[in-house]
């Protein structure tokens, strides 16, 4: 459009966006600097914005040795736990929600809508509001300190089912009719047609759910007691204790960097899928 | 909206639904009904049996000044985070929606905090504002400001608000940007021909058309502040000092874990459930009506 | 009131794509100018440049005496009707029409008077309180028109405004738009890809192709004397027949066994040419330039018939009154007047005779 704007207004978006990027990035940069310093520099309040020379030392110690005073677990094992949890939640959620959406869309059976609403209502019940009763059930089932206990209760939620249902509704009826004429039953139609068409939706949902699983806090905090079952997000919280002398800040910040790395990498590398997944799961 | 043709099979669909339904029943409905059930009961001193007490747990709750304090805290916290994160995100989205060089780069640089866990976001901000060694905290003290969120409740509140806002900006930014880009370009062009300058175009055309997005985000943000910020509060302040940052959700957690008052904790859970259900219901009503269309 | 002048207007997009490659023409004050061409020919870009919605890369656009290259859309004193109407979905019909006046700080009672006048002219008075989504396609079209006329601009711009309507409504609105434009006497530039709209509505017709103007003229000139092969086949339905032939020493064109005699010209003999014959110009049993054609196929259109056959190895379509021919198979004696023949140079695509 022909717009004769003062230079100030042409520059304004860049100024505002740069300030935005600065605000967003600054805390992470400070954490990065923290992860390259030695304990004394931070503890004595001598930290500046210039990275120090302890990068390799801190990352090595954090990953493979662990903090000396607090959690004592090598962070690589925490990352493994987080990874297992995030993958189980993401893949499990996709599997159970895609087949349930298939049932709701491609079949007529008694209580079909009842089943749909039963799933739908769970949108309204975040784990935080029913935390203790859920904890008790997991405890009764003997699932404390297990991967199953970490992941399974978070696998069921309506978002995936709704997303797939919505997507299936956009698949033309003719496709199903044609494959019926071609002699494909429900299972063949699912495997040969529905699944390949759903790939992007699956990938988008995976990105969102992986981040969701990796970032879980309250749930793993409650149901893991053994150190070797800790996830990285819990681990970092446990490294920071109120007695300042015990907190090894440089290692805590290294852990924070490591904890952010996988989900942030997923967002940046798979930006298109991420945006799509986010916008669609919320609609 | 139903499919024209369907498969005929009685048992396969039920089999397909089984995993989803089983997990939903065991981990959603059963605990939720447990919460409702135990909110009407109290445990005896030994924790061996419970007794039906009707609404007593609720009465105790509503007679407790601490509960009102937590409500007030939640109200301040959620209002502040929602208002700040929505308005900052809207500003950034409007700027990024302009035809400027590098809009895609700005977008990438602004959206990634979505992937940072709330607890980690809390830790990052705590690290900068920790009174004795935090960089920014030292700066504040250097210019003579008495900064100590570990002792001062209002400062602690400011810190969790800032951390929660920081974390939420990227999410709101993405949705506002998507909303802006969904507005047909010809409407903006038509308004330009109709003589509306950029500021007036924004307030008379863009903003009204963005209102469904804004309303949707309002509800999502309130739910976010209620529940997802648990990690931030726990990491930054642990609900303190002197319960200054104990929100309703944090109180459920703290009372259940530390106090062992399961009946009271359950009653709080039930109230929270009612709040979420009400919020979601409001959202659906408005989404149906589409605010402006 | 003002005319529009375009001088060597060019649009090059980032990445080097030339959408408009140096276009010049004049639209006199009060004229109805139609830009027509296939999709992607640059006609919409050109219109949007006149509106100020696209920057021009080089050249000049003037409205009246004023060069508007660097002037914002709001200040060009134009009104535009968009293909999708671009009605503001959150405003009712009244506010949609009033919006441009409000932005220009017109007094309230003046706005009210003008909106009601416009509504009366367009017969949409009962709809003033409705939202756009409650209107039919034709009603939306009228509101979009109302938004344009209420402002009393120097120039009306139309970007394929009828393409979202059904066929019947399109004919009706076509007439109404043209009538309104004549009533107000406002210069109009109208973009379409529909050649019937182009022929019926225009005072000046601009045929565009691949970012360039192929021909400018009145609809009759363009129909009677297409300047290029492209214009010849683009304007007219069914399209003009083009058959290959050779220029003879006596100035006639030989196609197969037939000779077609032309009005005097100075094109060199021996060259191969393309001979153009409009299906509706060919007559059964005509005395001028008589030739025979074997009937291969007949399409019945109700009022007329299309007869398909071969001439000089190329397909020929002849349009004749319905009932002229019974069935395929026979041979037909045809003729065509010399002044209805068109000859094009196959090398350049330009008109030779």
Image (cartoon, rainbow, N blue to C red):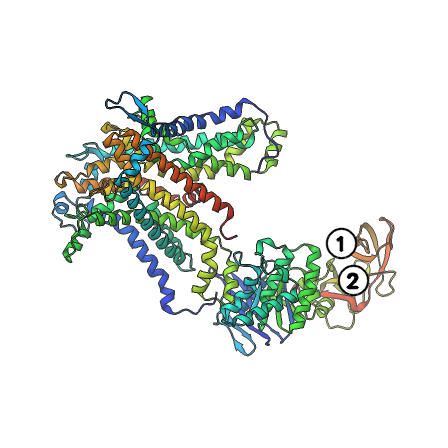
Which structural element holds mark 1?
strand
**How many dots with numbers?**
2
Q: Horizontally, is C17 left or right of A275 in the view?
A: right
Q: Residues within 10 Å of mark 1 (few under 14, many from 20)?
A: few
Name which residue lies at 48% across and 37% down: A162
- Distance between the alpha carbons at the discs numbered 1 and 2: 16 Å
Estimate how packed mark 2 is, as few (under 14), some (14 to 19) or many (20 or more) residues with alpha carbons within 10 Å.
Answer: some
Q: Residue at x 43, y 49 (%)?
A: B215
Q: Is residue B258 visible?
A: yes
According to the image, label 2 marks what residue? C254
Q: Which residue is mark 1?
A: C315
Please provide percent x and percent y for residue B188. 49, 61
- Kindly give the residue lying farthest to the bottom in the view shown: C65
Q: Chain of mark 1?
A: C
> Is C323 left, or right, of C125 in this rendering?
right
**Residue at (34%, 57%) from the top-left corner?**
A17
């Amino acid at each position: 459009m022909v717009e004769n704007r003062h230079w100030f207004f042409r520059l304004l978006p860049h100024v505002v966006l740069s300030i935005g990027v600065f605000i967003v990035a600054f805390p992470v940069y400070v954490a990065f600097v923290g992860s390259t310093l030695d304990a004394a520099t931070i503890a004595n309040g001598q930290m500046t914005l210039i990275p120090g020379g302890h990068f390799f030392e801190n990352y090595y110690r954090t990953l493979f040795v662990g903090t000396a005073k607090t959690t004592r677990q090598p962070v690589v094992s925490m990352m493994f736990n987080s990874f297992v949890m995030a993958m189980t939640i993401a893949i499990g959620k996709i599997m159970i929600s895609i087949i349930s959406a298939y049932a709701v869309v491609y079949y007529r059976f008694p209580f079909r809508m009842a089943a749909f609403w039963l799933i739908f209502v769970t949108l309204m019940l975040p784990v935080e509001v029913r935390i203790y009763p859920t904890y008790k059930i997991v405890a009764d089932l003997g699932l404390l300190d297990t991967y199953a206990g970490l992941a399974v209760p978070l696998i069921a939620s309506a978002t995936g089912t709704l997303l797939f249902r919505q997507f299936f509704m956009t698949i033309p009826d003719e496709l199903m009719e044609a494959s019926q004429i071609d002699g494909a039953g429900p299972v063949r139609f699912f495997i040969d047609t529905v699944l390949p068409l759903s790939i992007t939706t699956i990938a988008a949902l995976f990105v969102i759910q992986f981040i969701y699983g990796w970032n879980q806090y309250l749930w793993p905090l409650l149901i893991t007691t053994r150190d070797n079952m800790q996830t990285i997000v819990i681990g970092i919280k446990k490294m920071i204790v109120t007695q300042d002398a015990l907190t090894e800040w440089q290692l805590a910040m290294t852990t924070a960097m490591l904890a952010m790395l996988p989900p942030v990498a997923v967002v940046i590398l798979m930006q298109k899928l991420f945006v799509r997944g986010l916008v669609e799961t919320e609609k | 909206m139903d499919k024209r043709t369907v498969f005929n099979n009685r048992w396969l669909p039920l089999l397909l639904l089984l995993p989803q339904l089983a997990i939903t029943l065991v981990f959603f409905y059963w605990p939720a009904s447990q919460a409702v059930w135990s909110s009407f009961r109290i445990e005896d001193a030994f924790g061996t049996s419970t007794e039906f007490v009707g609404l007593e747990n609720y009465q105790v709750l509503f007679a407790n000044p601490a509960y009102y304090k937590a409500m007030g805290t939640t109200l301040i916290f959620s209002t502040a985070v929602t208002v700040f994160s929505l308005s900052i995100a809207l500003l950034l989205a409007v700027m990024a929606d302009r035809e400027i060089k590098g809009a895609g780069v700005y977008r990438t640089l602004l959206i990634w905090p979505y992937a940072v866990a709330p607890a980690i976001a809390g830790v990052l901000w705590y690290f900068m504002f920790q009174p004795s060694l935090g960089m920014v905290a030292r700066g504040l003290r250097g210019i003579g400001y008495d900064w100590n969120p570990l002792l001062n409740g209002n400062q602690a509140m400011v810190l969790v608000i800032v951390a929660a806002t920081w974390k939420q900006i990227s999410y709101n930014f993405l949705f506002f940007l998507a909303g802006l880009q969904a507005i047909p370009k010809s409407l903006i062009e038509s308004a330009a021909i109709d003589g509306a300058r950029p500021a007036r175009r924004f307030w008379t055309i863009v903003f009204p058309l963005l209102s469904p997005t804004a309303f949707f985000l309002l509800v999502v943000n309130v739910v976010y502040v209620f529940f997802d910020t648990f990690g931030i509060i726990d990491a930054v302040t642990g609900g303190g000092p002197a319960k200054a940052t104990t929100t309703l959700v944090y109180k459920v957690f703290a009372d259940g874990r530390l106090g062992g008052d399961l009946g009271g904790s359950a009653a709080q859970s039930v109230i929270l459930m009612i709040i979420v259900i009400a919020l979601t219901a409001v959202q659906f009503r408005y989404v149906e009506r589409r605010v402006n269309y | 009131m003002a005319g529009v002048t375009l001088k060597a207007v060019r649009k090059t997009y980032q990445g080097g794509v030339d959408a408009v490659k140096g276009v010049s023409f004049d639209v006199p004050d009060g004229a109805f100018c139609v830009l027509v061409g296939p999709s992607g020919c640059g006609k919409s870009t050109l219109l949007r440049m006149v509106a100020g919605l696209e920057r021009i890369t080089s050249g000049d656009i003037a409205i009246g005496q004023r060069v508007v290259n660097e002037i914002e859309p709001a200040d060009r004193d134009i009104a535009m009707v968009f293909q999708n109407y671009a009605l503001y979905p959150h405003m009712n019909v009244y506010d949609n029409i009033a919006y441009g006046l409000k932005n220009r700080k017109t007094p309230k009672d003046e706005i009210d008077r003008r909106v009601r006048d416009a509504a009366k002219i367009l017969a949409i008075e009962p709809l003033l309180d409705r939202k756009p989504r409650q209107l039919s396609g034709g009603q939306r079209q009228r509101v979009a028109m109302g938004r344009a006329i209420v402002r009393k601009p120097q120039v009306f711009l139309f970007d394929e405004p009828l393409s979202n309507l059904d066929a019947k409504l399109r004919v009706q609105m076509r007439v109404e738009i043209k009538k309104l434009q004549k009533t107000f006497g406002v210069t109009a530039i109208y973009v379409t890809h529909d050649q019937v709209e182009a022929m019926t509505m225009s005072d000046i017709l601009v045929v565009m192709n691949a970012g360039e103007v192929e021909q400018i003229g009145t609809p009759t000139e363009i129909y009677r004397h297409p300047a290029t092969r492209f214009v010849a086949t683009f304007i007219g339905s069914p399209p003009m027949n083009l058959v290959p032939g050779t220029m003879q020493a006596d100035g006639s064109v030989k196609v197969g066994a037939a000779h077609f005699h032309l009005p005097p010209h100075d094109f060199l003999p021996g060259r191969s040419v393309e001979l153009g014959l409009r299906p509706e110009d060919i007559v059964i049993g005509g005395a001028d330039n008589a030739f025979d054609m074997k009937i291969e196929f007949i399409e019945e259109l109700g009022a007329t018939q299309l007869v398909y056959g071969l001439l000089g190895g190329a397909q020929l379509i002849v349009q004749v009154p319905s009932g002229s021919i019974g069935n395929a198979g026979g041979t037909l004696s045809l003729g065509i007047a010399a002044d209805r023949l068109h000859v094009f140079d196959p090398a350049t695509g330009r008109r030779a005779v």
